[in-house]
Image (spheres, rainbow, N blue to C red):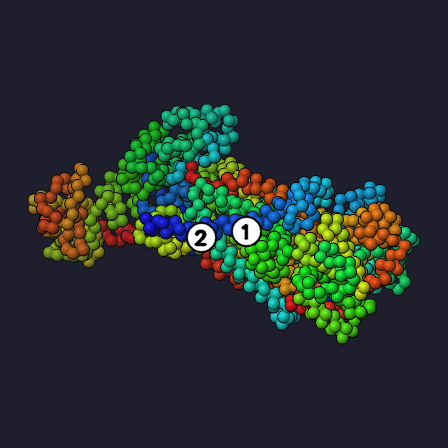
Amino acid sequence: MVEGLKERLGRIPLILTLALTGAVIYLPILFVVIFSFNSGRFQVFPLKGFSLVWYQKMLSDTAFMDALRNSVIVSLGVGVVSTIFGFLGAYSLVKAEFRFKDLLSTLLITPLAVPGVLLAISLRVYFYSLGWSFSLLTVFLGQLITNVPLALMVIRARLLQIPLSLEEAAWDLGAGRLRSLAEVILPMTIPSMIVSMLLTFTFSFDEFIIAYFLTQFELTLPIKIWANLITGYDPTVNAIGTIVFFLSLVIVFFGQRFILGKPYQKG
Amino acid sequence: MASILPLSAGKSNKPQAGGRERRIMGNPWYGLIPAVSYLLFFYLIPVVYLLSRSFKITQGSGIQFAPGLTLANYIEFFTARTNYLAYARSMVISILVVLFASLIAYAVAYTIVFIVPKRYQQMTLLLIIAPFWTSFVIRAFAWQLLLAEAGPVSAFLKQVGVGSLKILNTHVATVIGLTVFGVMMLTLNLYSVMENINPNLLAAAADLGARRWQTFKEVVFPLSRPGLLIGAALTFIISFGDYVVPSLLGGGVRIVLSQAMVGAMTTSFNIPRASTYAMIMLVTILVVTMPILRLSRVGLNTE
Amino acid sequence: MGSNSIVELQDVTKRYGESVVAVDAINLSVRRGEFLTLLGPSGCGKTTTLRMIAGLETVSSGKILINQEDVTYLPPYSRNTSMMFQDYALFPHMSIEDNIAFGLKMRRVPRDERLKKAREMLEFIQLPHIAGRKPNQLSGGQRQRVALVRSLILQPEVLLLDEPLGALDAELRRQMQVELKRNQQQLGITFIYVTHDQEEALSLSDRIVVMNGGRVEQMDTPKMIYEQPRTTFVASFIGRCNLRKGIAEAKEGRLVVFLDAVLGKFPAACFNGVEAIQPGQRIAIALRPEKIRIGREAENCQTKAVGILKYTGFLGSIVRIVVELAPGDEVVVESQALPEAQVGEKISLGWNCDDAIVLTENSGGDK
Amino acid sequence: MTQKFDAGKLSREISRREFLKWAGTGAAAGILAGCAPQAAATPAPATAVAEEEKIVNVLAFSGYEEPGMLDSFEKATGIKVNLKIHDGTDDEMIALIQTSPAGTWDVMTPTSAYVPNLAKEKQVMELNPADLPVGDYLKPFDKWPTCFYEGKMYGLLNRFGYYGLTYNSEQLTAADVQSLDILMDPKLKGKVALFDWFLPNMGVVSKWLGFNPPYRLSADQLGQVKEKLVQLRPQVGLIGSTAQTTQALASGEFWVAIAGEFVQAGLFMDGHPYLATVPKEGGVTWDQAVIVLANTLRPQNSLKFLNYVGGPEFQSKLAVARAYYSMVPNRKAAELLTEDQRKLLNMADLDNLEKNFLANLSPRERPENIDEWAKIWDEFKAM
């Protein structure tokens, strides 16, 4: 009994840490949400009063809407392309054998260990040297760098769980490489492809530093937010932050089945 | 188990010596073409090109280089106080962030996995990591307003009589901002390893007479170490290379390495100098994280 | 090799890298319609051999013929063989009927037709009601049957089975063995069957190929394999046996075997299946436990010994006892009746030299 | 640090060729070139003049991007304004031009103090005053000295303002802020907020010490500025970004800042009790000028754009931009503002603006030894 009580008491600091951490993580978000509904322009207490003015401003601000559209375009592109590249690459890494495969596998994930600011600057110099102009296309190309390896890792983990015998059975029953890919591997990989799309979409949607260095006029949402925050303390960004937060909560809870879902169980 | 050796794709893909054997179903290496060629042209070549510029000096404007190679940029880096101070700040900040974030995230992940009732576990984890999916820039900026001397946290502290908060525009604020981010990342990593610990192992340890602390020390911690190491390595990389948080929270005066790099690029447009910072940043990350990753045996080849 | 051989392996070798030889220049000839088993411990190369026949594994050197046609480099989908996998490899995302009809789909058989065929197959295994289910909704036995008919739907000439009963519990396993054998006889298809379970091999097979270390140790009928093993490996792998090494010597004009342990010596005259043993040659003696007599029965035997009874185990139809002849030298005996002696007491053993199997030491790869 | 521009060398793009050679000109370059987005090889200027693309690329400080600012220009001319809002310093703005392929930018809006140097290096296009609405400009903005170089016009002043004292009118009276000395008052200890931008702050301190012009100081005078800063340091509770400083004043925790209408007007309009004034020692101005880059591919569009942003409609909107309020040089624009807005912006009496208001203000310049200034500021901050 005493031991049990002691153990139960021992949990209290841990639960407190969890609660406190949660509070600290949500503090800035709470701040953003509160001030998105505050009629005053400056983010100071006491609050001036409830208002939806910043939401109205956001909706009527074409620059914000353009940035949102640009972000969606780029992130969709990044999500789809990195997932396709990731799938093809992961399939080959799992199924093919060649020299220096280990080396290549390691090289393929190194972009995840290179800080974004370094990638951003190197691409800026590179595109400049090539004489390209900076646009959403360059942002897209830049953001793929980290997202292709990410997609590849997510999908590869799934492919490794699929027993090789399934594909062999398909070959044995008359399917060629492509046929078995389409009939067996692809349908079984779809959950991980959804995860990959969700992850890469959201990473790209929130990516700042690469986009910041690689675009000129076509701003993405984080750059637009940054510009407004640095130069104009504009509470409209609170409205955007609030909406992005609640939307992503919905996506996360919708996608949790895929993101945290159990791995493949043998048939 | 020689008979299943080639089947366990990915597990023991030792490069076949010679590789002369014909494979009946073909060898589908070509699926790597898009990813590899993309990364070659838009990652490897640009990064190597940038790094190679660190052995050049500018001539005229920042994009024209004097002929020949030189170590002048490195000499400048290691002799100019502002440079090595920036480096030291980055290093100290990252180490502190990794330390704090590891401690906090470990407690958080442990609580979620072993104390929170099973049916609330996933929900709790999701709540902790959900802010991952909200704008990083907005969050960092919100921290700026929160931590300001005129901000609500300071007001609260004054109210309770602790005194005002004078940490914004110092790297204390940077460490706080990055730690919050690191906690989320580490929690996710730690949760996935801890959740995979077979509960029977804990039962067995308890059955063999281990107290809670001993069970933790002998079973839980060793089994969760890979997640901790990977999370710590990623946190280090992000803290060492981040530009947004030190800029928004740390103030512009005592700059860190990433700010020096961006400054060299945007203010003085000196590519060789920027690439020297880049090279030093990359080498540091390599030196720090390689042993960590090796220790935890991550990487695509050995899962 | 006659024209009635359907599968032929000629010096087939499989190497991994430079050093690992999984299959070492084996020659096999499988007769049409027979049930051939590849038997051996894990790592002996039996599965690799099977997979090379299926086309799932490349051949490093040598040739594989199916119906006298060289298929060494044909992909699996072009061979008239079908494989049944150890884990059944049922596609988890497809219904049972889609699983069974998969082979036909690959041959571009129209959907109605192939589903009709699949249902016929389900009738054949008496499981018509599971057509719409997913593999994870089936029991082990049901999965096994589905996997079998999925492989059979393309009417292969050769069915390759890779330990298909390995995942089943003992009772179901016996049941499925019977069913497999009956199916094979009914359909008249050649089965090449891989297992490490010697009882299964003995009860199912027309012929058994015992493999070890990538080589074929012996290829024969189950009876011959059991009664006349040609190597120490076969002798010890098939059934239980007491194996003792020794040296043959000439004594009083006859060959006598001196064993390293204290089992005793044998006159050479009564050795079975030994053509030429030279004096001085190292040989081995294998004694099946059921051939050793105990107690009173031992008295009439040609060779006798006395030991201490260490253990008695009642196994239903037989009794298994362990006798220690000298410290560290134990003999396993199976007898119909319980011994008179108690554990710890002295007991006498005896055997006839006709019952001993003599193996020359170089006659097989001993581990 | 001085910006070295060399358009000729830039356009030759030596490094680009060198780089391509290095990267291998084979298939790689082929693929890259194939999908290059509007590869920005410099077209011949002749064709560019003949048929200009209907766009103008503008690098501006914030304000220009706000809703409705450029709509009527785009509608009237059919020219699409590609706008990039710059969030750094003037030096960074100029550096950005260098990191972009030649001809990327047509128009930008640096502080006018940078114009003469840019003109000297032939980075900017000469302007003809007759093409521009300078006739409507208030004196002396029609002939703002730093917009000229060797008697020729290179920049069009677009907006301006001043750094004086912005103060909390509930805590301080107009009499209190007559002189900069109030900053040293014991009751303001820790209540002073400063922008983290050394040039205006140190300019005001220089004026405080009676140095005029404030940005051309001897080593000794600069030493005195430093000393004054050291004395001031205990009074200063915050040195932060625009957002932080404004926030700090709004919170009521800080009472005074070295700033003018660009901070005070926003606070005032949001209901915070802030007023701004030029103390008797004086203050410094800030301004932004619009320039056309010499290597523009679209000079005609750029001139149309300059005409628009110098015109009354745009200027009247810019004056009360959401980002920050500012004074504007176009008289017609000022007349479009309401009485209250003009009062707020010290533009109630347009005829005597120069005499009454500007008399005590010095233009913000770029000191020769700017690095030393920056160093002093950094030391001040670190104290």
Which of the pair B111/B6 is nearer the observer?
A: B111
Occupied quadrant, residue C297: top left
Is residue C76 in sight in this rendering? Answer: no
Which of the pair D21/D354 is nearer the observer?
A: D354
Q: Residues within 10 Å of mark 2 (few under 14, many from 20)?
A: few
Please report the residue visible at 46 percent of the width from the left and 31 percent of the height from the top.
Answer: C95
Same chain letter for marks 1 and 2: yes
Q: Is residue D17 left or right of residue B113?
A: right
| Residue B127, horizontal then vertical, whole percent | 52, 45
Which of the pair B163/D215 is nearer the observer?
A: B163
The circle drawn on residue D247 is none
Please report the residue visible at 76 percent of the width from the left and 44 percent of the height from the top.
Answer: D67
Secondary-structure class at tag 2: helix
The amino acid type, in three-letter code, at marker 2 is Pro
Occupied quadrant, residue A127: bottom right
- Label 2 chain ID: A
Residue beneath disc 1? A24
Is residue A31 in sight in this rendering? Answer: yes
Residue D172, above or below C237: below
Residue beneath disc 2? A13
Q: Sequence order check: which comes first, mark 1 or mark 2? A: 2
The amino acid type, in three-letter code, at marker 1 is Val
| Residue C160, horizontal then vertical, whole percent | 38, 38
Please report the residue visible at 26 percent of the width from the left and 42 percent of the height from the top.
Answer: C225
Q: Is residue A169 left or right of residue C323?
A: right
| Residue C273, horizontal then vertical, whole percent | 21, 46
Quarter placement of the N terminus of chain D: bottom right
Please report the residue visible at 29 percent of the width from the left and 45 percent of the height from the top.
Answer: C218
